[in-house]
Image (cartoon, grey):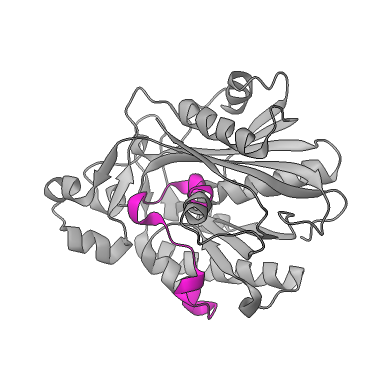
Amino acid sequence: MTIENQTAVLAGLGTCLPVREVDNAELVERLGASDAWIRDRTGIAARRIAPADLSLADLAVAAGGNALKSAGVAKADAVVVATSTPERLLPAVGPQIASTLGLGHAAAFDVSAGCCGFVYALTVSAGLIATGLAETVLVVAPEKFSTVVDPTDRTTAVLFGDGAGAAVLRSGRRDEPGALLAVDWGSDGTARDLIRVPDRRDGYLSMTGKRVYLKAIEHMTSSTLRVLDRCGWATSEVDTIVPHQANMRIIRAVAQRLSVPESRTLCTLERTGNTGAAAVPLALTRGQADGVVGAGDRMVLTTFGAGLAWASAALVWPEITAVESEL
């Protein structure tokens, strides 16, 4: 899909991470795995873990408030929340976030698309803007994977962390920096059991590792190529590929399939792990702070997650300053 009519433009970015960092050394004895084993298979050295009294909504409100501050706005017409780890089945957390942030009676709802949630939420928000239903939309992607990961399962406990990312989209022109130029999304429900939490009340997340690895590479690569085709960019013209921060092996394989050098692939998971829907905004914020992401850069965001689902988006990075915080 190529974005037409009123175009959604990225106007602000915010994140929030729990203060507590759990490094590999803390997991080694419990999981019977060495630091070298974890790093070699994942590229992860540490992850942030939220305490029980720090809620998903707390992280979301902090990240959302930071994004509004980054954008220099106090109001939004809609709030779209992307999370795989809701603390309750009903009601959605979106209205709570909107109310806490003082957004009045703004439309607010949740999107569940696994680790693709942030890009799915951007796409939905772009549709709201294109149809005139909203001029400004706050997208929030909070995750508390520590609530669904078995702490004794080394195939998942080493991977996932907690955190939240958020973005503000506003109505604008297609020819200005920050405009969402093209998006791609899709799903394959026949592979729904490859990543799942069978029972939210007392079940743990499980993954069929090898098949997930292969599917992630396949779909992030093909989705990226479709987005590039839709916005008329060659792979060589892209400054930065921002993949879902699942693990280093997947990121390297996607870069190789796309013939993109690792130097043009944003990878920030070493200190945060896989934070699901929050991973892309967290990576963008870290990349900007490190000077890797800059105004005028052509970039593609590409994601993959449970469902199975995948989504990608292309944009030119605008002159914004992300706002970060910890709780």
Viewer-side residue, 256 vs 264: 264
Query: Quick check: is 278 in the magenta stretch?
Result: yes
Q: Quadrant of residue 36?
A: bottom left
Is residue 219 shown to the viewer in this render?
no
- Residue 33: % across, % down: 16, 56
Viewer-side residue, 249 vs 295: 295
Q: Residue at position x 70%, y 18% from top? A: 104
Q: Is residue 27 left or right of residue 126?
A: left
- Residue 204: % across, % down: 34, 40
Q: Quadrant of residue 151?
A: top left
Magenta extent: 254-282
Q: Is residue 296 left or right of residue 118?
A: right
Q: Quadrant of residue 152?
A: top left
| Position of 282 relative to 222 (above/below) | above
Query: Quick check: is 31 in the magenta stretch?
Result: no
Q: Is residue 32 left or right of residue 60?
A: left
- Residue 110: % across, % down: 61, 34
| Position of 81 relative to 152 (above/below) | above
Viewer-side residue, 170 vs 143: 170
Image quarter in which the C terminus is found:
top left
- Residue 310: % across, % down: 58, 58
